[in-house]
Image (spheres, rainbow, N blue to C red):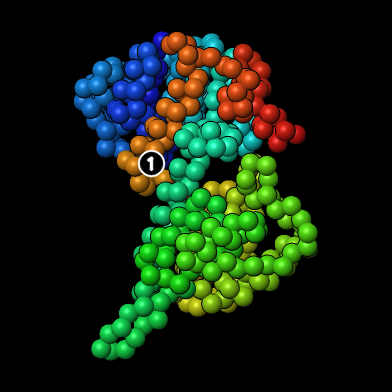
Amino acid sequence: MIATVIREQQPNEKRVAITPEGAEQLIKLGLDVLVESDAGLNSGYSDEMYSKIGARISKSRDEAISGADILFAVQAPVPDDIRKMKKEATLVSFIWPLQNGDYVDLLIELQISSLAMDTIPRISRAQSMDALSSMSNIAGYKAALIGANELDRYLPMMMTAAGTIPPAKALVLGAGVAGLQAIATAKRLGAVVEAFDVRPVVKEQVESLGAKFVEVPIEEEETESGGGYAKELSDRNKERQREVIHQHVRKSDIVITTALIPGRPAPLLITKAMVDDMSPGSVVVDIAAEQGGNCELTKAGETVIHKGVKVIGPLNLPSSLASHASKLYSKNILSLTSLLIQEGEPDFNFGDDIILNATVTHKGELISPFVKENMK
């Protein structure tokens, strides 16, 4: 059975789906690993490194794709690549099915089995496969570094002969995996950190990292989905939330926003009026830029300067740490593949919650209950 690793072709994508270490583990599972030439080059993994552990190198992309029984990628391959795959071959990558209905329809039409790394259920047994958490961790770390780099002042308190400089104030909106890593990184850099999340249950995690949790008194409402994600609030509670956030944004030097809702545009947390009240030289780093942004002024892939405040909308932050991002993603895929491959063949055991929810399409049908429910 041929397992193929292809070179990513999307702009600014430097990651590779399987590292040489991961390829070696796939070979131990009984798979014949075929790697498209230079697939790992941008993340620091040469063709020689793959050859050394027993993988074959393909100079032809079309040959690599058409011969694959199971195809590994980071970003979902373009439709032209999908059309070259064997009928009933298997694709494993990020797919984002809720945002890409036409792509899912194509997979169904071509009878390609697909497992989405973005629909792995957030249960304890699936932690080693949770690529969203792995990549969010990197994004939060990098966002704090971007904020520190773009800010025109120190982060830590500095006591000098010329006087004492107070520490910078950082506010993190959203205390999921990315937010918690942003908090930890900003704290290590010496900033005074506050954090807000609609889920009161994360207060203890925020405080354990040395940050102050910003509490918003809201009416009784369920704020967390079954998968552990934040849910969108009612309009009334959104208004209360904005009033409190405005007070804290006004006095912050760095604001990092990380709030996302699966399958929906990113919630608006920072209005233009809030940015108007920030001090010139302050920075907003909006991790949610690709999903529309948490800040009203965010432009994906750009830095907007508004009244002296920088509003930064970075794209694909995990790719900026391509070596470690690939290492973590490869381990996530390997954990899932170890569950999927039984005796050298894919076993789509839908009695297993992980396989059931991760499988978007199989034999011309839509499978994942998570996708079915949210597509409605």
Report the side of 175 relative to 335 (left or right): right
213 vs 228: above or below: below
Q: Which residue is mark 1?
A: 325
Residue closer to the observer: 266 or 125: 125
User: Of helix, strand and loop, which one carries label 1?
Assistant: helix
What residue occupies the far bottom of the structure in this picture? 162
- Quadrant where the C terminus lies? top right
Instruction: State the residue in front, 127 or 143.
Output: 127
Return the x and y of residue 60 as percentages of the image width and height: 33, 18
As shown in the figure, which amino acid type bears the numbered disc 1? Ala
Is 359 in front, or is 9? 359
Residue 95 in view: no
The quarter holding residue 161 reads bottom left
Which residue lies at the image location 23% right of the left edge and 27% below the top edge?
49
Q: Is residue 139 above or below residue 352?
A: below
Check the image and report above or below for 280 versus 263.
Answer: below
Give me the residue at 50% from left, 37% from top.
Answer: 127
Q: Position of residue 299 (x, y in %)?
A: 53, 56
Q: Residue at x 31, y 22 (%)?
A: 24
Q: Is residue 216 left or right of residue 309?
A: right
Left or right position of 99 against 299: right
Q: Residue at x 31, y 83 (%)?
A: 159
**Residue 86, position in %: x, y?**
49, 11
Can the viewer see residue 113 in this picture?
yes
Residue 102 at what x, y percent from top left? Answer: 63, 28
- The quadrant of the image that shows the N terminus is top left
